[in-house]
Image (cartoon, rainbow, N blue to C red):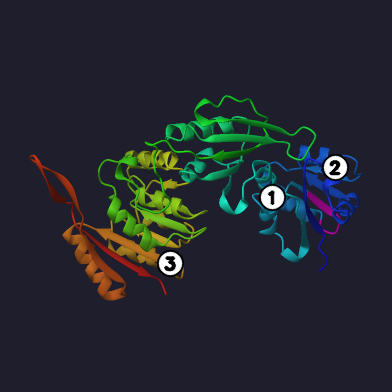
Amino acid sequence: MTPWLHIVGIGEDGLDGLTPATRTIVEAAEIIIGGDRHHNLSANVTAKRVAWPSPFDALIETLKSFKGKRVVVLATGDPLWFSVGARIGRAIPANEITYHPQLSAFQLAAARMGWSMADLETLTVHGRPVEQMIAFIQPDVRLLILTTGSDTPSQIARFLSERGYGQSRMTVLSSMGGADEKRFDGIAETWNQAVPAFNTLAVECIAAPDAALLPRVPGLADELFESDGTMTKREVRAVTVAKLMPMRGALLWDVGCGSGSVAIEWMRAARYTSAIGIEPRADRRAMAAHNALALGVPKLELLDGTAPDQLDGLAAPDAIFIGGGLTRDVFTACWSALRPLGRLVANGVTLETQALLLALHAEHGGELVQIAVSRATPVGTLTGMKPLMPVTQWSLIKR
């Protein structure tokens, strides 16, 4: 099949920046779809102009209605890098589309900064919660961020300053490659620049001696989480998340999520992971929501209810953690819903839960371990080791 849909990346230099072949395709189009900015950049082309539909989810049906015509979608930079091309490609067969990439904002920004693309993190908060960039704040890391608008750099400056990265260098770049290109430089703790709404932000994270250390590997300090004391503790949490095996794009069910510590560490550990927390207590859901925002995973979904009833209709998970409320019925429902190669981890501290874990292990196999942790604590003028409650942990993979 000859592709009928062309998705063209365009920069601030408009048609002049396209290759001759791509420019010919745009000039020959019968229908051009894009935002106001894209239409202005291709103003000399005589074609029917279509704006992004509202709601944006209607885009696919709009495109399909034009099948059989010469259709061009204009996007900024590389259509497959945090852009509309990937969304269209999930709904329309690849053999019906031709992509024409232009230099992305990330590539242009890296060139302006003199940074190696291989040595930095690229992320977008455009149309997404700005808090999700918090998970990337680490010493000496360089970030390139597609922003939501003119206020985004100030929000990010505040996130940096609150975590001890106030000396981080920030640069806002706008209209890169065009006649109106501008650059704004500053540091996070004194950032007060008024910048254009459409911009790309470069951040060089510089940590103070007392800066928060928030690695993406599991095992964050307990003190970083708001809780009522019932959450999975640091050492056990690190083992738990490791056995859940976070992978790019994977979904976790956190059954009895409490303050959300396991789900939050899961989402921080690999890019584009997601998690659904099931928790009947409103106060604990509120704590989990607060923790998710503070630690950079604002997309944690929290549901009011208990398993197994609340599990009906949820997307099939790649991993399930049962941190509370384990019963045979809960296990059966979870195991049935788990995708092939999915990982299930259940923790228990009571004798009754341990007995159930022992029985389930005998029936289904997997790995049964007991995790015993002691922490140093003052004993008068000396120091002793105070044990935490041992945790029995059962884990297995669905084959």
Residue 69 is one of the magenta-drawn residues? yes
Q: What amino acid type is highlighted by mark number 1?
A: Val
Real-space Cα separation, disc 2 to disc 3, in angstroms:
48 Å
- Give the residue at mark 1: 84
- Give the residue at mark 2: 42
Q: How crowded is mark 2: few (under 14 residues within 10 Å), some or many (20 or more)?
A: some
Q: Where is residue 109 in the image (x, y as percent from the top left)?
A: 66, 43
- Give the residue at mark 3: 342
Q: What stretch is highlighted in magenta?
A: 67-73
Residue 262 is one of the magenta-drawn residues? no
x 51%, y 59%: residue: 248
- Tell me which label, 3 or 1, sits earlier in the chain: 1
Real-space Cα separation, disc 2 to disc 1, in angstroms:
18 Å
Q: Where is residue 210 in the image (x, y as percent from the top left)?
A: 37, 36
- For numbered disc 3, what is the local secondary structure? loop
Residue 124's quadrant in the figure?
A: top right
Q: Tell me if I can see residue 67 in this picture.
A: yes
Q: Position of residue 57 (x, y in %)?
A: 66, 48
Q: What amino acid type is highlighted by mark number 3?
A: Gly
